[in-house]
Image (cartoon, coloured by chain):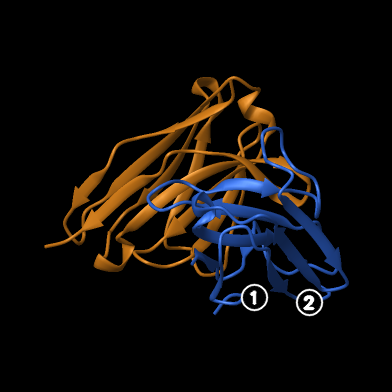
Chain colours: A blue, B orange
Amino acid sequence: QSVLTQPPSVSAAPGQNVIITCSGSVSNIGSHYVSWYQQLPGTAPKVLIYENKKRPTGIPGRFSGSKSGTSATLGITGLQTGDEAEYYCGTRDNSLSGVIFGGGTKVTVL
Amino acid sequence: EVLLVQSGAEVKKPGESLEISCQGSGYSFPTSWIAWVRQMPGKGLECMGIIFPADSDTRYSPSFEGQVTISADKSISTAYLQWTSLKASDTAIYYCARSGFSDHGLDVWGQGTTVTVSS
């Protein structure tokens, strides 16, 4: 069981918007920056959002991140079929080494 | 271009030893943490541990302490993940990734190494 909690799945039609939540605690999300990763089927993960809300070069503005207290969210607007993937949140924890990840959320485009 | 290139797929028998590698290029390899991440079949991401190649400072996640060894050779910009006695439950894809953002945000990922352990 992951320290960070994400919904197992979300779905929406093309063009619609989705929000993925990541819930943690004071010792992780409440104290550290959150990153979000996209893993397309059969590929390595790729960072979409870092430091809660920043996008690396090349990531479309349709992807956005935010954090409030001990929760973070990833928003995807104008959903496309190419967005079908698994999405993970990640951060640090004061009592653990390395990175902790959420359990992942599968996004399905209907 | 910043790249992490991992060694190829491995098929091993239970009890055998194994070392897989991750070579960095296009940046100062010694001065960025490298994380090893496991993904078991059909499952999520788990960080096994991290290493700072400049001084080989290594931190293991509790679930992996004593189960694997993480090391690095900064002279050849390469990090390693090693097992002394593989189990069937070690079957997974293993990724290395660079900690390039604050709080170990992982900005560059290797392509992954598939390890299959089967008798």
Q: Find residue B16 and report its image quarter.
A: bottom left
Q: Amino acid at mark 1?
A: Val
Residue A39 point in image, percent of width and height: 50, 53
Sequence order check, earlier mark of 1 and 2 = 1
Residue picked out by circle 1: A3
Query: In the rendered image, is residue A28 in sight?
Result: no
Measuring 42% from the left and 62% from the top, which residue is drawn there?
A: B67
Query: In the rendered image, is residue B43 in sight?
Result: yes
Tell me the SS state at disc 2: loop
Residue picked out by circle 2: A25
Neighbour class for label 1 at 10 Å: few (<14), some, many (≥20)?
some
Subunit that carries the residue with mark 2: A
Measuring 60% from the left and 77% from the top, which residue is drawn there?
A: A7
Residue B17 point in image, percent of width and height: 26, 50
Residue A19 point in image, percent of width and height: 70, 67
Nearer to me, A11 or B80:
A11
- Is B6 placed above or below A109 here? above
What distance separates the C-alpha of mark 1 from that of mark 2? 9 Å
Left or right side of B37 for B88? left
Residue A66 point in image, percent of width and height: 82, 60
Subunit that carries the residue with mark 1: A
Q: Find residue A76 and report its image quarter.
A: bottom right
Q: Amino acid at mark 2?
A: Ser
Measuring 80% from the left and 55% from the top, which residue is drawn there?
A: A52
